[in-house]
Image: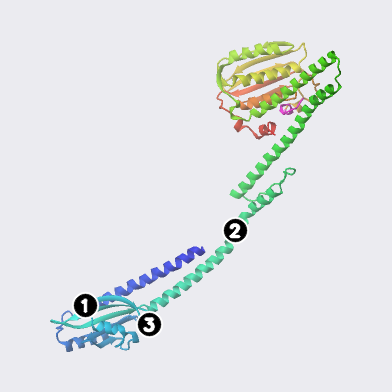
Amino acid sequence: MALLIGGSIPAVYQVLFQEVERRAEAEIQEEIQEFRAEIATLPLSDRTVLRNLVERYLQNDARDTDQYLLFILEEQLVASNPANLPIALQPGSPLMEEWRSLKRPLQKRVRVEDANLGEVIYQVEPVYGLFVTEGVFVVAYSTANEQREIDRVIRVVLGVMLLLLAVASILAWLISGQILRPLRSLSSTARSISDTDLSQRIPITGSGELAEVAQTFNDMMDRLQEAFQSQQEFINDASHELRTPITIIQGHLDLMGDDPEEQAEVVELVHDELNRMNRFVNDLLLLAKARRPDFIQLETVEMGALTEELFQKAKVVVACRCQLESKAEGELRTDRQRLTQAILNLVENANQHTPAGGEIAIGSSCSRKFVRFWVRDTGVGIAPADQARIFERFARASDTVRRSDGAGLGLAIVQAIALGLGGRVELKSSPGQGSTFTLLFPIAQPKNKWRTSSSSLIRLYHES
């Protein structure tokens, strides 16, 4: 605003002064036209008649305050209006000396030393006789009073603008303080956050863009807190799962003697523990890959043939009776390898919790909107309190006995594959009555749904 005021004042001054000059020139032209009309019908060769006419004209003319009318005959000032001229216009002055000798029309503006006149705009109109110039009529206009009025207007405008600048500055300071308060709070909260304390949040008041920024920041902190918490839990669980086989391997190697039979037993045990660690690491890598865009490679598969293939592979895995309940007909756009991996993980999980006399069944079906692949068992079942938790990493049902050396990542992998394929996992189970895991996929599937998965998925599969 200060720059605007600094640039506008000279512009306003220039516009006003140009308006004064335009008005002065218009009045001078009007006066010249009236004088020409007055003397147009008179014999100008008679100087006495001409003089009397001009004197009478000047006496009767209603001039403006800043206007001066002069008539010079035979290079002498013979009449003027007003009679008492300023010193700068009196005989002997530079302007008068110039006017006396003029024989042709002239319009000019000149600045004189008299402060009461300022810049003088004048026009000289020669009065021609029969063969010679009889005299000159001069109309002069002083801009001093107009200049003083312009200066007064400029001072008033400048004062008003400075007052507005002061008021606007105060209002801007107050309003910007209110506007920037959430940003200062955001900065303060950001500085107070450390790797051990992610609980700080910005208080949100009102609405608008800044409230939205604060809400976005708080949401970001919620996600970061969940991510750090998940990372810490992952580190704790992974270290616990890796510590056990490392301790077993190290202890047996330390106690191994020179007996070849004992050495062979220790080597076999070490191989077994290393294989378990290898499966554990591979499972973690698979979950890490689930966040990459190339995790899913879609292709068109025939659902009936795929279901039959899954059944044939499942028969080799399970230790109890296995049967194929139904096969869907038609084609499906999916990732054959990832879907097979998810189903076989469910089969292995069912095999671990189903007695030898039980039954495991797989099947598929297709409706108007969804395709279903399921694995049903007659095992021990899962308590309702554990049904949401078992899809987390390293989670197991609290009331079951561990029957495998797995790390508890199988169902987490199934969940990741289902979400990557744009579907979900449904579980129906009751203790003592078995469980049914169903992979549910929409008919129209996106190329990769991982990027649009929910915050719970991020929490479950966050990488360290």
- Across and down, in percent, residue 430 comes to 75, 21
In the drawing, what numbered circle is on residue 67? none
At x 39%, y 76%, the residue is 146
Q: Image height check: is 122 above or below 189?
A: below
Of labels 2 and 3, the one closer to you: 3
**SS at mark 2?**
helix
- Amino acid at circle 3: Glu
Q: Image height check: is 259 above or below 205?
A: above
- Across and down, in percent, residue 101 comes to 23, 83
Gap between marks 3 and 1, in whole Å? 26 Å
Check if mark 1's residue and mark 2's residue have beta carbons within 8 Å. Answer: no
The quadrant of the picture occupied by the C terminus is top right
- Across and down, in percent, residue 162 comes to 52, 68
Q: Main secondary structure of the magenta part?
A: loop
- Amino acid at circle 2: Ile
Q: Could you tell whether 106 is left or right of 193 in the image?
A: left
**SS at mark 3?**
loop
Give the residues in magenta: 388-396
Circle 3 is placed at which residue position? 113
At x 64%, y 25%, the residue is 417
Q: Could you tell whether 94 is left or right of 12 in the image?
A: left
Q: Image height check: is 377 above or below 175?
A: above
Circle 2 is placed at which residue position? 175
Q: Is tag 2's residue or tag 3's residue first in the polypeptide sequence? A: 3
Q: Is tag 1's residue or tag 2's residue first in the polypeptide sequence? A: 1
**324 or 232, nearer to the observer:** 232
- Amino acid at circle 1: Arg
Circle 1 is placed at which residue position? 104
Gap between marks 2 and 3, in whole Å? 53 Å
Is residue 201 visible in the rendered structure shown here?
yes
